[in-house]
Amino acid sequence: MARAYSGCEVWQQDFLKLDLPDNYFDGVFANAALFPVPSQELPSVLLELHASLKPGGVLFSSNPHGHNEEGWNGGRYGVYYDLHTWRRYVSAAGFVELCHYYRPVGLAAGKAALASDCLAPVRSRVALPPPDALSHRCRSHRSA
């Protein structure tokens, strides 16, 4: 679907067997895709994704919000991180948080999915826009 509607090159791989070129992608879109990665594998997966991004590249990921539970839930394996723990993982991989928000808008954090588009980590070696510009980007996403 992404290829048909965007006209962009689309790659699909297993996170536990990534084979990505370094400094290649402008962005990685992992919507509800990283939470099934076991916690012991997540650091290497995030490092691989970081290496695959061009300087200034963005990782978009949304994850079901939780309290750091890991295991099977209704026939599906997942890790449900809280914001503090998720920040620790992405920071350790070299990403810088632009902002974060919960969706759907208006629900309390405990009842919403953590979306990290505006936890859109960006390569840390790149000069980031001024904080006011980043805040505006996150606010505009929340209202959408």
Image: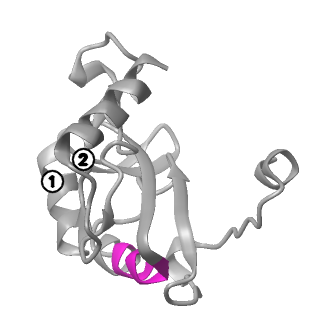
Q: Amino acid at mark 1?
A: Thr
Q: Amino acid at mark 2?
A: Tyr
55 or 49, which is in the foreground? 55
Mark 2 touches mark 1? (CB < 8 Å):
yes
Does the rendering let one see residue 4? yes
Residue where numbered disc 2 is placed: 81
Asked if residue 137 lies left or right of residue 33, the reply is: left
Residue 10 percent across, percent down from the top left: 74, 65
Residue 1 percent across, percent down from the top left: 81, 47
Residue where numbered disc 1 is placed: 85
Determine the secondary structure under disc 1: helix
Determine the secondary structure under disc 2: loop
- Image quarter of residue 136: top left
76 or 104, which is in the foreground? 104
Question: Who's the residue at 33% across and 26% down the image?
Answer: 139
138 or 108, which is in the foreground? 138
Vertical side of 140 occupied by 8: above or below: below
Q: What's the magenta region? A: 46-53
